[in-house]
Amino acid sequence: MTPSSSHSPASPSTVRRIWAVIPCAGTGSRAGADGPKQYQPIAGKAMVLHTLDAFARVDRLAGVLVVVSAGDGFFHGTDAPVLVAPCGGSTRAQSVFNGLSALLERGAAPQDWVLVHDAARCLITPEQIHALLDACLDDAVGGLLALKLPDTLKQEVGGRVAATVDRSDKWLAQTPQMFRLQALQQALQAAGDAVTDESSAMEHMGLQPRLVEGSAQNFKVTYPQDFALAAAVLASRSNTNQAGTP
C-alpha cells in the first residue's frame, strides 16, 4: 500500500454504520486486583459497566460488541445492552482482530466505522465520543483521541537522565480509536501482535490517523492507585449531576 494521509480504501463521503468494540479479555496483572481489573468495582459497579454506560448514551452507534475470553460468564448476569463475543486472544491485537471478525459475522459491512475502546478507560464520556465522531466521519483515514504531553519528557540511560526530549509534537494516545472495519482488520493482520493500539497498525500501513484532543480524565486504570482516582472522578461527576437536578 502506498503511504498516504489523504487516501482511503473507501470514499469518506459514503454513509456507513458505526460500531464499537471493547476488548475485555485482559487479566489486569499490573492492577494488583483479584481477577480481571475490568470487572473490579469502582463507585459501586464493575469498571467495564461505567465504560459501557458512556457508549450506551451515544445514539449514533449501531451496536457495541464486547470481546471476552472463552468461558467468561460475567455478562450472563447483567442487563448491559451489548453483543458479547467469547473470542478474546492472548494479546489486545488478537482480541480486536477477532472482534472485528465477529462483527462481520453479525452483519457489519467491511466499510463500516469501528470505535475500539479500552474497557479500563471507564471515565470516557459521550461528549468525547461524539467529538471523535464529528472529527473523523469524513476523514479519509480515521483517528483517535489523544492528549498533548503536559510534562517534561526525559530520556534515560542506566537510571540517569541522558537528555530532555522536545515535547512540542508529542501526544499521549487514548481511546476510542476510529477506523473502517476492513482497513483496520487488514492493518492488524499485517502489523502482527506487537502493536499496542489500532493507530499503530494503521501507521504500519503508511497511513496517518487524525489526532483529536481528548481529556486528562480519560486515563486507563492500570495501577492500584488508579482505582481511587477513578472513583473520585466518578463521585465528583455524580455530585455535579445531582446538584444540577431540580
Image (cartoon, rainbow, N blue to C red):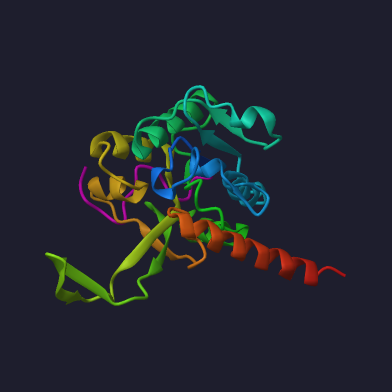
At x 65%, y 27%, the residue is 76
* Relative side of 207 to 164, left or right: right
Chief SS of the magenta region: loop
Furthest-right residue in this view:
246
Magenta-drawn segment: 1-17
* Relative side of 60 to 196, left or right: right
Q: Is residue 72 magenta?
A: no
Between 214 and 47, the one lying in front of the other is 47
At x 21%, y 51%, the residue is 3
Between 20 and 118, the one lying in front of the other is 118
Quadrant (top left, top right, bottom left, bottom right) of the N terminus: top left
Residue 150 screen position, x and y as percent: 37, 75
Quadrant (top left, top right, bottom left, bottom right) of the C terminus: bottom right
Considering only vertical position in the picture, is 185 above or below 61?
above
At x 34%, y 50%, the residue is 199
Image-quadrant location for residue 244:
bottom right
At x 43%, y 43%, the residue is 28
* Relative side of 115 to 140, left or right: right
